[in-house]
Amino acid sequence: MTGPSDLVVAVDVGSTSARAGIFDAGGQRLARAEHPFATARPLPDHAEHGSDEIWAAVAAAVRAALTAARVAPARVAGLAFDATCSLVLLDAEGRPVSVSSTGEDRWNVVMWADHRAIAEAAEITATGHRVLAHVGGVMSPEMELPKLLWLKRHAPNAWARAALALDLADFLAWRATGRVVVSACTVTCKWTYLNHETPGWQHDLFDRIGLEDLPRRAGLPQKAAQIGSPAGTLTEAAAAELGLTTRCMVGVGLIDAHAGGLGLLGGVEESELDRRIAVIAGTSTCHMAASPAARPIPGVWGPYFGAMIPGMWLNEGGQSATGALLDHILDWHSQAPAGADRHARVVARVEELLAAEGPAMAGGLMVLPDFHGNRSPLADPSARGVIHGLTLDSSFDSLARLYYAACVGIVLGTRHILDAMDAAGYDIRVLHLTGGHVANPVLLRLYADATDRVVTLPREPDSVLLGIAAAAATAAGLHASLRAAAHAMAGPGREIMPTPQRQAHFAAEYRRFLLMQEQRRALDAIQ
């Protein structure tokens, strides 16, 4: 007699590692495990992974999580994957095809952060095609069409071998089931698929930009599948690698930030959605707002229909480098500590200086955080970071002040995005925050004080894993719908209120922040 199949496995593939969590139908996490994988950077603005290595990391993380949870594989009814919006290239046999300047097939994934296709993105923007109304008016080099066009032009041998191109989350579902099923999330948000129309693919755009052969080279299905719908059961090979059974149902997944948005907002009542936003803040930051109304917002991706919450329109703001920027500040400075706790040691000193001197302790230092371009709301991948107010001080305290100024710049960048969304019809009063930034007490306090909004932390700190767990539970039939799953599995955490005494200070800092953007534009305009 077999026992119940009442658990799901959620797999989140980020920028450097794969994470797996075991959840019950009520959203209780039983275990979590993580396994790293490599990133290659053979040229400036190029960033690549290997899909075989990512799959091996996924398998290792799932097996480790099962061991930690001490559950029998037969108890796992469902599995789903989220991943960064990275591009995987395969041949007709499902083998890796190189996307790299090195020509090595090992590197067959163009990472989301890869900016090699800036020129191609500008060309697509110049077409003025109506799909641009659903990406904030400007095509980003982080989306898949520019990267695919770059590959066709600059890697013709690889392009000739290509027979399947998938977003990373869809690749993982294919590797698990042997079936090509593309998510309404991935292709709507990153491939210009219009999920609110039939047909969703806009072949006239492909023809106009020279990708008329894309449907054949990418193996594109005619229709996208809805999030949380069944993609198929595990193949024997995948079940053996993951340590699960062939009865395990694989659900259609999401992009990682969108899984976080689902985990944070999926259970919010429709009448409250316009006042709330999910902020998924780690290496980069994504700002996910959902509404019953379609709202085109310049410089903000979307509106995308059904790409995160069924029946809702999604607007997606973003910052390409946030946690990565703080890493970069530490890499730069001669007094930066080494080791895994290097951020914690600098943050501890920042908190001491804040206690002694207050929020003005940066001493006039200001940072525009666009070191890797401005994704939103300026939609300018060529924008560059600015540091104002440097002195000759090279002490550890100078590092702490610069680090704090960078934190302020990051959060003011979020405020800029929120204001653009509010101007288009939202009235965002509450930030549902998750990701690595939650572990940084300085950033956490700034998200309330420097945006002048309430910050809510969820019961489950890893909302990305929770969101993809809801998709797995839906596919496995543990809940009747994705909204029902998200509502049942989410839970409230604690709130952080903005500090009234600091609002005048941060309002002035925000005015300086916007003025610095104007000055940067003026400098860039000088020929």
Image: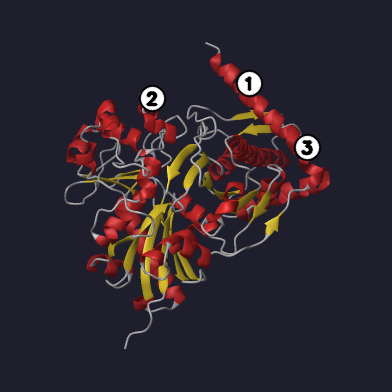
Identify which residue is drawn at 26% across, 34% down: 203
Q: Nearer the viewer, mark 3 or mark 2?
A: 2
Using the rendered image of the protein, determine whether residue 111 is visible from the camera's viewpoint: no
User: Is residue 251 shown above or below 428?
Assistant: below
Callout count? 3
Which residue type carries mark 2? Gly
Q: Where, by quadrant of the figure, is residue 34 drawn?
A: bottom left
Which residue type carries mark 1? Gln
- Is 467 in front, or is 293? 293
The disc placed on residue 128 is 2
Q: Where, by quadrant of the figure, is residue 367 drawn?
A: top right
Q: Earlier in the sequence, mark 2 or mark 1?
A: 2
Reading the image, the residue beneath label 3 is 505
Please rate how many residues cluster around mark 1, counting C-alpha atoms within 10 Å: few if below 14, some from 14 to 19, many from 20. Answer: few
Identify which residue is drawn at 37% across, 73% down: 76
Q: Secondary structure at mark 3?
A: helix
- Is 42 in front, or is 253? 253
Which residue type carries mark 3? His
Residue 4: x and y in percent read 38, 81
- Is 303 in front, or is 332? 303
Question: Which residue of the protein is positioned furthest toward the bottom in this rendering?
Answer: 1
Reading the image, the residue beneath label 1 is 519
Q: Where, by quadrant of the figure, is residue 366 drawn?
A: top right
Q: Earlier in the sequence, mark 3 or mark 2?
A: 2
Say whether marks 2 and 1 touch (CB < 8 Å): no
Q: Earlier in the sequence, mark 1 or mark 3?
A: 3
Is residue 225 shown left or right of residue 423? left
Please rate how many residues cluster around mark 3, counting C-alpha atoms within 10 Å: few if below 14, some from 14 to 19, many from 20. Answer: few
Distance CA(mark 2)–CA(mark 1): 28 Å
Residue 210: x and y in percent read 25, 28
